Image (spheres, helix red, strand yellow):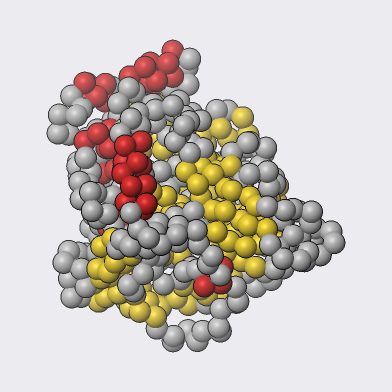
Amino acid sequence: MTKSNTARHPSRRQFLQTLAAGSATAAIMTTVPNMMPGVVTGRAQAASPANLRNLVAAPSSANLIPGGAIQTPVWTFNGSVPGTLLRVKQGEDVNVAFENRLDEPSSIHWHGVRLPNAMDGVPGLTQKPVAPGETFEYRFTARDAGTYWYHPHINAPTQLARGMYGALIVEEDDPISVDREFVWLIDDWRLGANGEIDPTFNGGHDVGHAGRLGELVTVNSVHNPDIAVRPGERIRVRMINTANARIFAIDFAGLAPHLIALDGHPITPHVPDEPVFLFAPGTRADFVIDVPVDATGGFALLDRFFDGLENPLVNLRVQGDRMRDEISTARMALSANPLPEPDLQNARREQLLYTGGMMGGGVLRHLVETGKIDQGFLGGVRSMAQSMMGMMTGGGVWMVNGRDPERDDNGPLFDLKAGESCVFTLTNATAWYHPIHLHGHAFRVISRDGTPTRYQEWQDTVLIAPAEQVEIAFVADNPGDWMLHCHILEHKFGGMSGFVRVA
Ligand code: C2O
Ligand code: CU
């Protein structure tokens, strides 16, 4: 759907096909879904609060390339990609001893979880880096039900690209009833000549364009897994985009799944109207899929973000007897999480202007001409225009209100009062998509380009299209320093970063 600079990828893809074809093993998988890594069917064992879990960061290897012959060296949590799936009940304590057996410092950030600042896992801001050989204990209460994930927050472009991530599922007290549940961690890998992870991280081209895009898309580290489903079966799929940079535009192949949660938080169940579902790095989406009772064959879920460069995601193969004669009518709506409701009337209003990257000048000009960017505000960040001239010369490639928070040391973007309601207007004055993530809170996405959103959805990461303006609203009720950054990890590296201080 988006035409962009992807010329290098077809040849990489061909190369992968060559690698895969060289292996004698058939690429067709007949995996039993329950045995796929990351697929969980039962509910969690009741875990006592004292129950300490271990997550060990260490090198390992994974078979990512179809065919089974090639092992790719990866970095992992507990030896596998994805790392150990953590599953707790809402209200339960999470208690994780994180041991770093890598050769470089690491940490664990619990993406989307509203937890105490000291547990947020951001070296340099909320804790010291966990040095090689060290252990750090993370403890927090899982206040909100939903689909969350964990990953390092230091040298993230490298550590995530090498495979370091896992899911944290917080079960509702009153779960909806489905026949099976899947957790899909969707990733995109850029591999080198021998199937190893391409070791050029934070390359200038990636930083200034769409980030590190790869050529091999996997779900739970398997390329295009084949999953058998029964006619009439109702499944819940918890999808997590763990890619450094790839935004997926998911085509559900004629299925009409209901979206029931975004970033862990319930949304009014509905079938999205758009022909594809835009799914950005860092974000999660929970869908209920009802396999039609008269379905035959299968449903090949596809990513269509780049025209002509579609990626197969998952093949749902219809097999076996009908599970029921008519589609389940059981409740799909999830109970709300205990989120504080922002007071829009009296909210503090702030602007965040994102600029930079390649080809951004025209977008900025357009937004100024159409009055979307206030002249007075722009005047205040005028130095930005000059800095933009000098970009790609070693400084920040991206800017937030004229600053490069990755490199300058000017403190928080905003000092917020604990308990204060905030409305931030985020303007994407660039030629690229950006999923902007706020730590430690969830916010409502209240409008896009001046039009109120239909569902006023809660998110922790909001995807903003080029030239788009989005308003988010939240209560800054969690004291501490909380990052607010683009989850395209190369963009964050290039300056699309920063934090807010709540005190
Ligand atoms: Cu998922 Cu600041 O990150
Ligand atoms: Cu970005």
Q: Residue at x 57, y 48 (%)?
A: 301
The answer to whether 244 is drawn above or below residue 159 in the figure is: above
Nearer-the-camera pick, 386 or 100: 100
The answer to whether 436 is drawn above or below residue 232 in the figure is: above
- Which quadrant holds residue 40? bottom right
Nearer-the-camera pick, 383 or 275: 275
Q: Is residue 426 left or right of residue 393?
A: right
Nearer-the-camera pick, 228 or 478: 228
Q: Residue at x 63, y 36 (%)?
A: 274
Instruction: Say how many tags the image has.
Output: 0
x and y percentages locating residue 268 in the rendered image: 69, 50
Q: Residue at x 35, y 79 (%)?
A: 54
Q: Is residue 501 left or right of residue 411?
A: right
Q: In this orientation, does residue 394 appear?
A: yes
Residue farthest to the top?
Answer: 369
Q: In this orientation, does residue 74 appear?
A: no
The answer to whether 299 is drawn above or below residue 372 in the figure is: below
Q: Which of the image's four quarters has the C terminus?
A: bottom left
Q: Is residue 2 left or right of residue 196?
A: right
- Which quadrant holds residue 234? bottom right
Q: Residue at x 36, y 42 (%)?
A: 13
